[in-house]
Amino acid sequence: MRPMPILPAALLVIAATAANFALAQQQADRAIGRTQEQQAHERSNERRFFDLDERDRVIAEIWGLNAEEMQRAKLLLQGPRAAFSVANLSPVEALGIHARSEAERRKYAELFARAFHQDVERSLAWSSAYQEAIARLYPNEPVVDYSGQPKVAAPIGAADVLNVPRLQLIETPAPAPSSRVPAADRR
């Protein structure tokens, strides 16, 4: 066997290595392409899953949330929070419960407190308007007509709190305050 000259042998090794490298590169490119395609598809699915529809955008605006916060709230409300909370838990409550910092918790607590305060104001204004309408439309009629109802045995204080006319009562004495002293205070 005759020894090969170094140059042609080196060229053969380089050519074989280059062919193997090219094949490996093609396989890697296909794998990367497939991976990038899969990642793009997954991102597309995630966007569709978290895309905010018109209803979500309106709810976010009502609560003072941006799109990212609303998307996170939707995810939280579909996860374990759905099992632990009432069905009508607000997105702000979900974000507050799952706050990632004290500052975030405070932010969502303030949003909720403002919304609740405004709702109480609206409810009281509605109640006042209703009372005025009843008084104006039915000035000589009681809101509740107790005539024909049997009298009730109750203390006057309880009836007054419940706005039951005293004429409907069979007066009973109010319960006496408890005279029991806790064991720790008997010394």
Image (cartoon, rainbow, N blue to C red):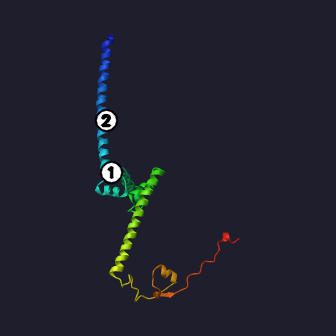
| Residue 61 location, quadrant | bottom left
Q: Quadrant of the N terminus?
A: top left
Q: Residue furthest right?
A: 187
Taking the spot 29% from the left edge, 38% from the top edge, the residue there is 34
State whether residue 80 appears in this view.
no
Residue 9, position in %: x, y? 32, 15
Label 1: which residue? 50
Image quadrant assignment for residue 115: bottom left
Q: Amino acid at mark 1?
A: Phe
Q: Sequence-wise, which precedes: disc 1 or disc 2?
A: 2
Query: Which secondary structure lies at badge 2?
Result: helix
On the image, the x and y values in percent for residue 82 come to 40, 59
Question: Does residue 102 appear in the picture of this structure?
Answer: yes
Foreground: disc 1 or disc 2: 1
Q: Residues within 10 Å of mark 2 (few under 14, many from 20)?
A: few
Kindly identify which residue carries mark 2: 32
